[in-house]
Amino acid sequence: MCIVDHTKGTNPSYAFDFSMSSIAPDSIFTRLLMNHREVGLEPDQILAILDLCAEYHERALHIRLEFAAIREELDIRDWDFDDHHMDEIARLLRRHARLFEQHEMLLFEYGRKGRAILSEQQLALAIEVYEREERRTFDVFGPLVKRALRMIDEEARDGSRPLLDMTG
């Protein structure tokens, strides 16, 4: 279970997210720090986690800036699409993919570092906080999703909207 703050788990739409966006959040450990009393964090642990937050921010920012620069270089208006340019596009896309992977790995790298700061009991409490927040979110969005699915089912039954065949 996550203690790092990526928003996929507490965002019910994550199951329907086809955008291929990063799971790595802009900031980390916010929930953990906000609930430091409940989790039982000591002052030295809070400082260590704040240090991780600062390191993560700096590294993620560096990656995002380079990522944005490559995205700008890939602006389709600037390309002739001859063989030479296609090779250059492929080179830039490989770099783009490596940066995306580096950004994603930050979440796991810093998640591991954060977990190392916590005792097993604190980790269990942090997970409880996360799961409680997740349940609250699903309590709000669950009825909305049920309503949407009911509408889709009704439309499929009356023939106004056929369901996609997802079996094949």
Image (cartoon, rainbow, N blue to C red):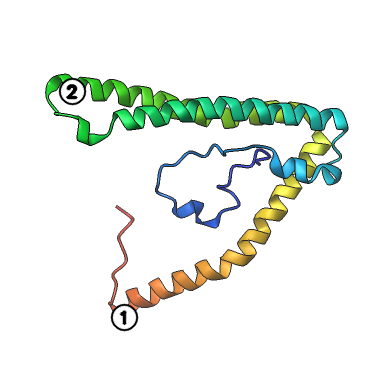
As drawn, is 106 to the left or to the right of 90? right
Q: Earlier in the sequence, mark 1 or mark 2?
A: 2
Q: Position of residue 106 (x, y in %)?
A: 57, 28
At label 2, the amino acid type is His
Left or right, 152 with respect to 90, comes to right
Using residue 16 as the reference point, say whether residue 118 is left or right of it: right
Q: Residue at x 18, y 23 (%)?
A: 85
Q: In which quadrant of the rendered image does the N terminus lie?
A: top right
Q: Position of residue 129 (x, y in %)?
A: 75, 49
Q: For the residue labelled by badge 1, is the local secondary structure a helix, a strand or a loop? A: helix
Image vertical order of residue 50 relative to residue 83, above or below: below
Q: Residue at x 60, y 52 (%)?
A: 10
Total marks shown come to: 2
Residue 149 in the figure: left or right of residue 135:
left
Residue 164 in view: yes
Residue under the point 51% across and 25% down? 62
Q: Nearer the viewer, residue 71 or 5?
A: 71
Q: Amino acid at mark 1?
A: Asp
Tag shown at residue 52: none
**Residue 136 position within the rendered picture, expressed as x and y whole percent measured from the top left:** 68, 60
* Frontmost residue, 149 versus 75: 75
- At mark 2, the secondary structure is helix
Q: Judge the density around disc 1: few (<14), some (14-19), many (≥20) Cα neighbours within 10 Å.
A: few
Furthest-left residue in this view: 82
The quarter holding residue 40 reads top right
Residue 75 screen position, x and y as percent: 27, 34
Q: Which numbered marker is on residue 158?
A: 1
At x 45%, y 74%, the residue is: 150
- Residue tagged by mark 2? 85
